[in-house]
Image (cartoon, rainbow, N blue to C red):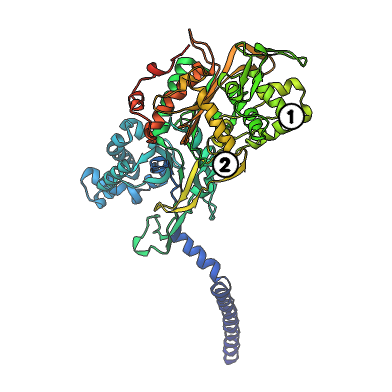
Amino acid sequence: MDRAMKQLEKGVKRRLILVCVVLACGLSALSARLVYLQVAEHEKYSQAAVEHYRYREELPASRGQILDRNGDTLARNLTVYTVVADPNHLRDVNFAAVKGVAKQKGMRERAVRQNFPDEEIISSYYAHISDKLSELLRIPPGELNRTLKGKKHGDIILARDIEEDIAQEFREVMEENSIRGIYLRRSERRVYPSPLTLTHVIGFVQEVEKNNDRGRPVIELVGREGIEKVYDEKMTGTPGWRDIERDNRKNEIHAFRGEEQLPVAGKNVRLTIDMGLQTKLEEILQEAYTTLKPEKISSVWMDPHTGEVLAMASRPHFDLASRKGSRRNIAVSDMYEPGSTFKIVAASGALNEGIVTPNTEIFCYNGLYDKEGFELRDHAYYGDLSVEKILVKSSNIGAYLLGRQLNRQPFYNYMEAFGFGQPTGIELTGEIGGVIHPVSRWNQSSFSRMTMGYAVGVTPLQIATAYCAVANGGELLQPHIVKSVEDERGRAIERSQRTVVRRVISERTSRQMRVALSKVTGEGGTGTNAAIPGYDVCGKTGTAQKNIPGKGYAKGRYVVSFAGFFPADDPQVVGLVVVDDPHAEGVSLFGGTIAAPIWKEIALQVARIRAIPPKNAEVHRLAEMTKDDVLFEVSD
């Protein structure tokens, strides 16, 4: 018996020892695992726990504004909200529905849970939301109810582009009625206060979805055309962030709000454009576009001493809000044969080289030149004309004979010097350089055509810039349409500088050209319809037969223009009007009869807005005249 008991005790001891060993090994392994998790894997699991409750909220940065030279807003950001419903939260009885139904029925939350099944609570909650938010959302209650019930997963978009005042109403209604599961998501929308004005210059932005540094999708505004594109990087701000903690229902715990970095707004871009002048220009061009029914029309106005563009417009154009219409900026993206406005190249070149003086007389062959195997004609039988008179009467033969005396290579050099054949470098998208062919490709006939503004391709901006050189004493300036880049307090970070590309002609030649061009708008000149009482106006008309690609020159179809500046003794502004293929009953289709009156109407507004003093008060009366008074005045 004793022996049996001893053997039994011995067996039990062995088993106990074995159990203890197993337990010890297990506990050791568990301890080792815990040590491993706490030490080796501490960072990993600690971060996972933090991320479960902590969230880095991105704070969007406002895109910089576009301003005119006087600080008027042309483009700005507007904070808007998207109203979003989360089906998972709406159907979570304890998260949202019980509280909302209790509010709806005037009961305690416990009573709602005890007296109604979950599905009935959820259904009542949908009805409660539909009743309270229907008016704000402008959705009938029944339709809103069906929309909320129709999707089990993923966001339900109920409204977009809700502005701050309406968003605040949403917050108040949802707070007052214990509505949860409906959220307002903030975003930025680009707003253009005058969506039909300066459209080609301003350009537009596009909403693009990108992933932030945490891989979360965010919407960014990206410039696609015009200033919006060229200055996209500078106007794009730097987003900020805020660390927040959330409970297990993803509600922010405000008491545990962590670090934050505030967003930095993008830079503002101030243009050289004067919106007062721009608005008048757009009105006048629109009326001419409607009345004359041209294929297109464009106009550029500049300060000849700085190269600043004061106004620029084209038709057809587009709506910045809808983006419908033509996005092509004709002033920089289209080239045309300029006709007689180009005659300043041959005339100023010959004067600058000392080959002729303003009074040098040239025989113009009585209106028909056929000496070199080709024909040139004038619109009148001119015999001897001085260099001045060649410009005043716009003699094609005279312009060629001036160019011939200058010779081919020097004439080409002056075309280049005036900026033709290369982009101006203005801060706009889509600019082209135009076309001037190398001398090696010329024959004498094509040379003759170039001197009178054919067989070359130029942009309206290039012509305006060339006339600035004639007006300012002979310097070709790089045109600018941006005055400065500024911070949100209006302090200039970058300023556009007056940039002289090169000297084209001497100051003496510039004075001689100004005197000659002032006579173009005087009695007997082709530009009398651009004359403004009270000012000495310099200018040149242009009439070029329209070249249809693949078909040649079209009979009875013209591109007409007028380029000019004033006052003659101290030019303050240069302007150009180009009308492509106009239609007008009872009016000859010439630059002097179509484009010059439009130019005059704009110039009257320029004089008033820019406060350019006249020699007498007559200009003030003219500035108030209607378009019908001045548009189609014909002197002969």
Residue 410 spot, x, y in % from top left:
71, 33
Q: Quadrant of the N terminus?
A: bottom right
Question: From what the image shows, is residue 517 above or below residue 544?
Answer: below
Q: Secondary structure at mark 2?
A: loop
Which residue is disc 2 drawn over?
478
Q: Picture quarter containing residue 168?
A: top left
Q: Secondary structure at mark 1?
A: helix
Label 1 and label 2: CA atoms lie apart by 26 Å
The quarter of the picture where residue 355 lies is top right
Task: Name the residue furthest top.
Answer: 586
Is residue 633 something one can see in this rendering?
Answer: yes
Q: Can residue 452 be seen from the camera position used here?
A: no
Q: Nearer the viewer, residue 399 or 441?
A: 399
Residue 341 position, x and y percent, is 58, 25
Quadrant of res 476: top right
Of marks 1 and 2, the one in the foreground: 1
Q: Name the residue furthest bottom.
A: 2
Q: According to the image, label 1 marks what residue?
A: 408
Which amino acid type is marked by label 2?
Answer: Gln
Q: Is residue 367 left or right of residue 285?
A: right
* Residue shown at the point (72%, 13%) measured from the top left: 375
Mark 2 residue crowding within 10 angstroms, few (<14) / some (14–19) / many (20+): many
The percent position of residue 321, horizontal first and vertical second, equals: 44, 32
Q: Amino acid at mark 1?
A: Arg
Within-10-Å neighbours for mark 1: few <14, some 14–19, many 20+: some
Percent from the top left, x then y, of residue 425?
A: 59, 40
Number of marks: 2
